[in-house]
Amino acid sequence: MSLMREIREFPVDRGAVALWWLGQNGFIFKSHEGTLVGIDLYLTDSCAGLAPDGMDLSRRVPILIPPEELDVDYFVCTHNHQDHTDPETIERLRHKDTQQFVGPHPSCDVFRQKGVEPGRILPIWADHELDLRDTRIRGTFALPTDASDLNHLGYILQFGSAPRIYMTGDTAECELLESARRHQPQLMITCINGGFKNLSHDQAARLAGAIRPKAAIPCHYDMFPDNAADPRQFRAALKLRAPDVRYVQPEHGKPLVYA
Ligand SMILES: [Fe+2]
């Protein structure tokens, strides 16, 4: 069975959320009522062609769902870098007219350029909240990692009555990230790669210590040979910086249920 069909058929208990990691910052979340939210789905190898000479940005994680098969209710992006808002993925979506598209304005521009109807595009910004059926998504502050895009976001995600999730998105270190604490997320999904000015494993662990979720999932270390990190470093850093936060290691394409 295709992964998209498995996700569609996967039952989610009341009070729980299921998530599937597709690599990098790409996740599909499913609520109890069946709402599907895809975030930062990078489903092509388009970054390979962007790499400067001598840098390898070819994808290492297999494409677990081809863009043509992707069928989610909300296609969400955190910012307009190609491993997060991928023009080729968006262009090839077959279900553009049944999904809604959410992101900061530069991502919205890409949605429009790649054929998404303007009425299906919902801009979002830090501290702005959107209700999407039984799901609520709020933009959080994230500090841009370079001048090529100055509109980075993280998200606070609430799926029905499941515990709130904080996704950092790509961000450089900054005290203001700790403002997500006021939403009391129980699960944190964080970049740990340290490259290109993103949070390192140690900075991410320190942030977890300030946010105080119950559990933390590392991401954004697995996709590109020249932007990789070992998640065990994050696990070790959590032990030092945030010993009460449980480390959770997601597996690509496998359901992870959080309640
Ligand atoms: Fe990224």
Image (tube, grey):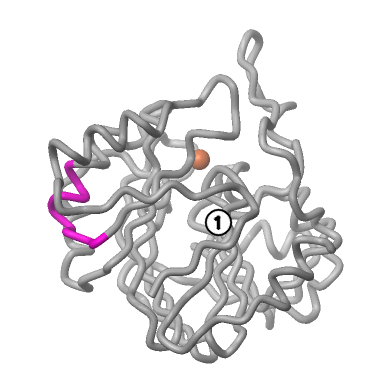
- Front position in the image: 82 or 185: 185
Q: Amino acid at mark 1?
A: Pro
- Above or below, 235 against 53 in this view is below
x, y percent for residue 185: 26, 69
Q: Is residue 37 left or right of residue 119?
A: left
Residue shown at the point (34%, 66%) measured from the top left: 126
Q: Position of residue 62 (x, y in %)?
A: 73, 39
Q: Which residue: 16% across, 59% down?
A: 212
Rendered residue at 62%/76% (across/down): 36
Reply above or below: 132 against 184.
below
Which quarter of the figure is the C terminus placed in? bottom left
Q: Nearer the viewer, residue 36 or 240?
A: 240
Q: Main secondary structure of the magenta part?
A: helix
Q: Position of residue 31 (x, y in %)?
A: 53, 81
230 or 82: nearer the eye? 230
Q: Give the magenta-colored segment's residue range.
A: 206-214
Q: Is residue 23 magenta?
A: no
Is 245 on the left-hand or right-hand side of 192? left
Q: In the image, what residue occupies the spot 54% across and 34% down?
A: 222
State the image quarter where residue 96 is shown. bottom right
